[in-house]
């Protein structure tokens, strides 16, 4: 729990540290978002819920690099009910204003899935399918690889240590400005190999003041072939503060 609170504090204070600079170093330009939400109750019910996310984008000539760290922790009367940590990085090499090649990798820890960790990597082609006034739609597709390490309980029950598969990786990312102070985003990510793993995130962001905004998001994760005692679909609903820099 202490380590989680430390991570939350880091995410919360990271923007102010970055905001002290102009995010330009040499030919590289940086920008990002820090997101934080927490619920703490005591008394007849003791609950803790913390959601943190830090996303950075680096523009370096024809390269655009993206880095994301996020964590989710929930506890109810000293019983952990959710815990997920994810780190990811992606590099895009832009051919022109619409097309690019990408390489991406992610590492996820979620003990409630029956896996110690999941590692995904993929590379392929991306294209801006649509560009409008205040809106766009990007698509990505390419081959990838997924490796999942079973936890000790599942290893004992199933008699093997890991699942791995070559996958077809696809992404659709849509964004539109609803007004001058609000925007809607929809992202869908899918990896299809021996099974289908998919993630959908739908969000609305409304500006409060300056660079501070309120974000409402619904995240759905789907696994077409979960382990025996697990469910195929997980949903997550968040209301967080978002700081852009």
Image (tube, rainbow, N blue to C red):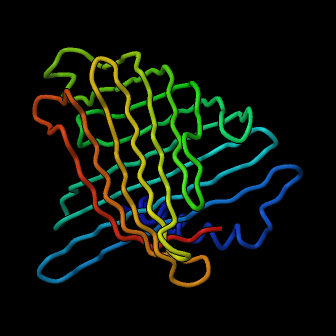
Residue at image position (22%, 57%) is 80
Give the side of residue 238 with respect to residue 21, left or right. Answer: left
The location of residue 208, given as percent across then percent down, is 51, 83
Give the side of residue 126 with respect to residue 145, left or right. Answer: right
Q: Residue furthest right?
A: 26
Quarter-wise, where is residue 10 in the image? bottom right
In the depicted structure, whether residue 59 falls above or below residue 101: below
Residue at image position (11%, 81%) is 44
Q: Nearer the viewer, residue 94 or 211?
A: 94
Residue at image position (41%, 70%) is 240
Q: Nearer the viewer, residue 224 or 43?
A: 224
The location of residue 215, given as percent across then percent down, is 42, 69
Q: Which quadrant of the rendered structure holds the C terminus?
A: bottom right
Quarter-wise, where is residue 217 in the image? bottom left
Residue at image position (63%, 69%) is 15
In the depicted structure, whether residue 81 falls above or below residue 91: below
Q: Residue furthest front?
A: 132
The location of residue 210, given as percent across then percent down, is 61, 82
In the depicted structure, whether residue 133 falls above or below residue 101: below
In the depicted structure, whether residue 237 falls above or below residue 180: above
Give the side of residue 3 with respect to residue 194, left or right. Answer: right
């Amino acid at each position: 729990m202490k380590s989680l609170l430390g991570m939350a504090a880091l995410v919360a204070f990271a923007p102010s540290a970055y905001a002290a600079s102009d995010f330009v170093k040499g030919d590289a330009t940086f920008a990002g978002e820090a997101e934080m939400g927490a619920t703490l109750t005591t008394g007849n019910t003791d609950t803790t819920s913390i959601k943190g996310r830090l996303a950075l984008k680096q523009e370096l000539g024809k390269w655009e690099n993206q880095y994301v760290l996020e964590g989710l922790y929930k506890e109810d009367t000293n019983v952990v009910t959710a815990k997920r940590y994810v780190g990811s990085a992606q590099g895009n090499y832009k051919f022109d204003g619409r097309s690019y090649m990408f390489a991406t990798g992610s590492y996820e820890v979620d003990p409630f899935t029956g896996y110690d960790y999941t590692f995904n990597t993929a590379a392929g082609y991306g294209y801006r399918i649509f560009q409008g006034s205040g809106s766009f739609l990007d698509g990505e597709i390419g081959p990838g690889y997924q490796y999942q390490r079973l936890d000790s309980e599942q290893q004992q029950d199933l008699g093997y240590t890991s699942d791995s598969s070559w996958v077809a990786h696809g992404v659709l990312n849509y964004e539109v400005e609803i007004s001058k102070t609000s925007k809607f985003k929809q992202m869908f990510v899918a990896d299809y190999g021996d099974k289908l793993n998919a993630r959908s995130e739908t969000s609305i962001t409304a500006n409060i003041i300056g660079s501070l905004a309120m974000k409402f998001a619904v995240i759905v994760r789907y696994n077409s072939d979960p382990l025996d005692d697990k469910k195929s679909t997980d949903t997550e609903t968040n209301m967080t503060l978002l700081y852009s820099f």
